[in-house]
Image (cartoon, coloured by chain):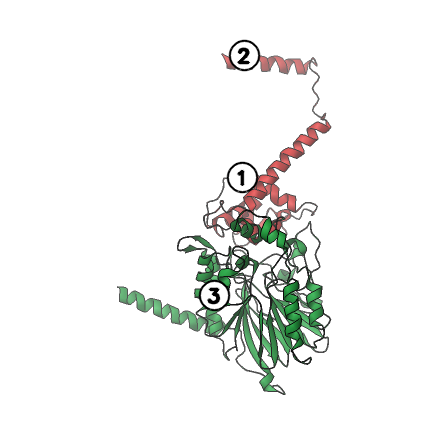
Amino acid sequence: MSTSRLTRRGFLKAAGALAAAGCLPVSTVELAFADRSKSFTFAHISDAHIQQIRGTKFVRNWDRGLIRAVAETNLLAPKPDFVVFGGDLAQLGKKSELDHGAEMLSKLSYKVYCVMGEHDYYLDLGEYWSKLFGPHYYSWDHKDVHFVVLNSVLTYDEWTHERWPTQEQRMLEMAGLDNPNGSQFMVGEKQRAWLREDLGKVKKGTPIVVFSHSPIQKIYKGWNFWTEDAEEVQALLRPFEDVTVIYGHVHQVQYNQIGKISFHAVMATAWPWPYPQSYALAKSHLPRLTVPMNRADPFFERDATGWQLIDMKNGRTAMRYNLYNNTNRAVAFNPKTGRPEDTKFQEPTAGLPPQVHY
Amino acid sequence: MYRKIAGTTFVALTLAVIVGLVPVRGDEFSEKDVKRWQEEYMSVVKTGRELWVSADLGTNGVACAQCHPNAANTHPETYPKFQQQLGRVVALRDMINWCLQHPLEGKPLALDDPRMVAIEAYVASERQGVQLAPGKH
């Protein structure tokens, strides 16, 4: 009995992998470019929010999102050069949650670079996260592109160190997206000084890709779709010709162009968030370029979640959103207009009814 | 005994009102009344907000606010409406119960449970000013 069950399970697993590979939307053909060595891909997975209930029990829904993203990323062909995890691996920063998430990420057959999210940070200020994943901010070079990871979820010292009686309460206060007791995110002076020095060593023609958890632009303060010192960070990036900022936190499709800087948000694997304009009592500055993701169908628990494959071609990015239960999307830099555009839905007449949010 | 007295008093008062002995008029209320009614309403909204961010409505620690910050993307103005996945026209409270049972892995509330009223009061308060659009998808 146990043998046959194992066999059946093994079969189902293999069948599942085949089925997933069959529907994988990802092109297996690399397009030819003038300089092929400057074209490569990487994957981006974000916002898993692994949440412990008690003991060995974790919220099944969020677990499934990350497991699926990891499994699908492993099926990519050609293989991506690396994977970035964009932050909020845990829900309440607990060791058990970070360990459980790290265990799932360990199944990735690629090098993984991690970004700090506020849900990872505000329990012990990133101490345990650091033991698992390394420094909070860092940079590296890959095939003539300079990559930077920032910890953009810092805030005022008084809020962090003096306001809350326990670290558990501090974590809970920051974990509520719409909690008025929360505080604005920032990169902070110390890290900006590091970034200035880091970029000072980079040749001006080099493409730059920055990963942060919060948007390095100001969209809606009430939900921290916002980084308080965004302009100061943008100023440090301004001398470069090709800059892309890729951020998590917002759990939705967003893109924008500010000067020479392209911005892309990524999907969560856990759950989608509303666009700020659908909160009737708030004003937001959602970039006008964005064609929204489809409104989520709650009856499909993976709907409006997903992960991304990013094509880097001569320093410019094309973001492919791999959406569970939805038509996939691609947002690519258009050299003619000098901004990221959806390759299918950018024209006002091309939109779908589910892309209307209210 | 008490019932008898209460019954007699009620009949007497009703008669008194009918013949105009007691000056009661249904359309008169003071600013004090309005203030009290608003406070009563807001206290229920407050309870609703507390439930909205509470991990105790379900069994897995997930709260309504996790997916619906400020109750956004709940669209109370569109109910009752046809919910294709349920195959019928439903009220907002039916969807609230659906969420309690599925994402929150909990039990549904009775439709007249004060907590249900509180949740509805909170959702509506975050959506105030938006025009009614029943049936809209």
Q: Nearer the viewer, mark 2 or mark 1?
A: 1
Task: Estimate how packed mark 3 is, as few (under 14), some (14 to 19) or many (20 or more) residues with alpha carbons within 10 Å.
Answer: few
Left or right of residue A288, residue A42 in this image: left
Q: Label 3: chain?
A: A
**The quarter of the displayed image where residue A268 is located:** bottom right
The quadrant of the picture occupied by the N terminus of chain A is bottom left
Query: Can you say whether A263 is above or below A96 in the image?
Result: below
Task: Say what amino acid the circle numbered 1 marks.
Answer: Arg
Q: Which residue is mark 1?
A: B115
User: Gap in Å between the C-alphas at discs 2 and 1?
Assistant: 36 Å
Tag 2 secondary structure: helix
Residue drawn 66% across the image and 47% down it: B127
Q: Label 1: chain?
A: B
Q: Which chain is green?
A: A
User: Gap in Å between the C-alphas at discs 1 and 3?
Assistant: 42 Å
Task: Estimate how packed mark 1 is, as few (under 14), some (14 to 19) or many (20 or more) residues with alpha carbons within 10 Å.
Answer: some
The answer to whether the residues at label 2 and label 3 have Cβ atoms under 8 Å apart is no
Residue drawn 66% across the image and 32% down it: B37
User: Gap in Å between the C-alphas at discs 2 and 3?
Assistant: 77 Å
Left or right of residue A185, residue B102 in this image: left
Q: Which residue is mark 2?
A: B5
Chain B rendering hue: red
Task: Say what amino acid the circle numbered 2 marks.
Answer: Ile
Task: Say what amino acid the circle numbered 3 marks.
Answer: Leu
Q: Which residue is mark 3?
A: A132
- Whether labels 2 and 3 belong to a single chain: the reply is no
Query: Can you say whether A88 is above or below A237 in the image?
Result: above
Residue B40, position as x, y percentages in the image: 63, 33
Q: Nearer the viewer, mark 2 or mark 3?
A: 3
